[in-house]
Image (tube, rainbow, N blue to C red):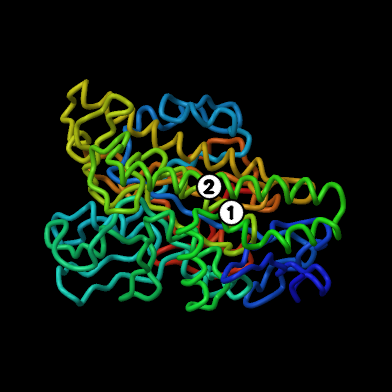
Amino acid sequence: MSRTLRTALSRRAVLRGLGTAVALPLLDAMGVPLLRAAGAEDAAPGTHPQRLAWMYFPNGAHMQDWTPKAEGAEYVLPASLTSLEPHKKDLLVLSGLAQDQARAHGDGPGDHARSVAVFLTCAHPVKTKGANIRVGVSADQVAAQKIGAATRFASVELGIEGGRQSGNCDSGYSCAYSSNMSWRTPTTPVAKEINPRLVFERLFNDGKPGESKEARAKRLRRRKSVLDFVGRDARALKKKIGVADRAKLEEYLSGLRDIERRIERSEDERKAGKDPAADFDVPAGVPGDRREHMRLMMDLLVLAFQTDTTRVATFMLANGGSNASFPWIGVRGAHHGLTHHGGNKQKIEDVKRINHFHVSQYAYLLAKMKGVKEGEGTLLDNSMIVLGSGIGDGNRHNHDNLPVLLAGGGGGTLKTGRHVRYPRWTPLGNLYVSMLERAGAKVTAIGDSKGKLAGLG
C-alpha cells in the first residue's frame, strides 16, 4: 500500500501506480474540506469548495426563441431552452447583459473575434493581426490566481475546435482573439486543449514526466486502464472506508473507466476511418463525432471538479465565427453563414436547431453534475456554470441583450429557478464580480464592470 494510504485519509489522498495518480472524489472519511487557503479571502470554513465554469458558443442566438416572455419564477422555457426543463429549478436565465467592449469603438468590423476576446476579459482588444495582441485578464484567470493554489491545476481550458495563435482570422484581428476566451495576462492567451486523451493523461499522471510517459506508453500498448495500475491502492482503500464511501468510490471508478473506453473507441474509429459525423475538420486523436467529443470533454470536466483537481474551467464549444455544420440535427449549412439569415425562414430554423443543440450539451453537463453527491447536496449545488455568447442576435451582430444562462447553487448563495431581466447595457462583468466573490475570490472589477450584479441571491 502506498505511503499516501498509510497516512490519514486527507482531501489530497490519491490512488497511485506506475506513473499514475488517480485523485479521489470527496468521501465522508475525508471530512468536510476547508476553503480558507491560498487567496480564498471570503470562503467560510466548513463549506464545500465552489467551482466556476464558463461555456462559450459562437455566433449569437435567435433571441426570440431564447428569451422567456415572463420574468421571475413563473417563466416558461422558450423553444431553444426546452432541454433545460429538468434543471429549471437550478437555472437563472439572465436577460439584458452586455459587453460594450465588443463593439467596434472605431475599429471597424471584427465582431466575432471581439466577442470571444471580450467575453471573459470585458476589455477591448487591440486590433492587430501581428504579435502585439492585447486585451485583458479574463475572469477565470483572475479566479485561478486567487483560489487556484488550493488545487492541483489552477484552471483547466477545454475546447472543440483547434485554433491558431497568429495570423488574420477576422477583419484584421489576430486568430488569437477568435481562438481563446481565457487570458492569463493582457498579452498572453491560455491555449485550450481539444484532445480528450491528452486531458485524461494530464489529469491522471503522477507529476513525474519521465515515469508518466513510460507508464502511459506501457498502458496504451497493452490497452490497460489507469485503474489496472492503481488496483492495489484501490483495494486497500476500500478496506478502510465505510459502506457509503465504498459505493461512492465504486461509482466513481466505474465512471472513470467508462470515459477511458469511450476515448479508446473514438480513437479506434478514427484510425479505421469510421467517423460518424466527419463533416468538419479535426486533427488526429480527436473524436470524429462532434457530439461525443463535447460530451467526453464535459465528462472530464466533471471529473476534474469532482476530485477537486481544479475549481476553475472554461469550455469553448467552437471558435469565434465558427462555420461548423450539424448534419446529425438536419443542419448542413455553415453555422456562421446561417446566422446571417436576412429573415430567411429556413436559415432561422437551422439557427434555432443549432442553439437548441448547444443548450442540450449544457443540459448534459448539468445532469452529470447533479448526479455527483457532495455532502447533503450535489456537485452542481456547489458550482456556478455559465453558458453564453458574446454576440446577441447573430444576424445583427449586436453585443447587448446577450444570451446568458447561469446554473448551480453557488453553495446556497443563488436564488435559482428564475428569469431575471436587467436594464439594457448592464455589464456582463458585473455577473463575474458576483460569481468570484461567492467562490472566495473577491475582486472589485473585471474589465468594464460597474460593481456586483443585483438580483442573484
Left or right side of 165 for 69: right
- The x, y position of residue 452, in whole percent, is 54, 59
Give residue 331's quadrant in the image: top left
The label on residue 143 is none
Proximity of marks 2 and 1: CB atoms separated by less than 8 Å: yes
Q: Nearer the viewer, residue 192 or 233?
A: 233
Q: Which residue is drawn at 12% across and 62% down?
A: 172
Disc 2 target residue: 259
Q: Which amino acid does label 2 sit on?
A: Ile
- The x, y position of residue 18, in whole percent, is 60, 70
Q: Which residue lies furthest to the top in this view?
A: 345
Q: Which amino acid does label 1 sit on?
A: Leu
Q: Which residue is drawn at 83% across and 71% down?
A: 8
Other-residue count near label 1 (Cα within 10 Å), few / some / many at <14 / 14–19 / ≥20: many
Q: Which of 438 and 268 is in front in this view?
A: 268
Other-residue count near label 2 (Cα within 10 Å), few / some / many at <14 / 14–19 / ≥20: many
The label on residue 303 is 1
Left or right side of 117 for 366: right
Whether 332 is drawn above or below 261: the answer is above
Whether 272 is drawn above or below 201: the answer is above
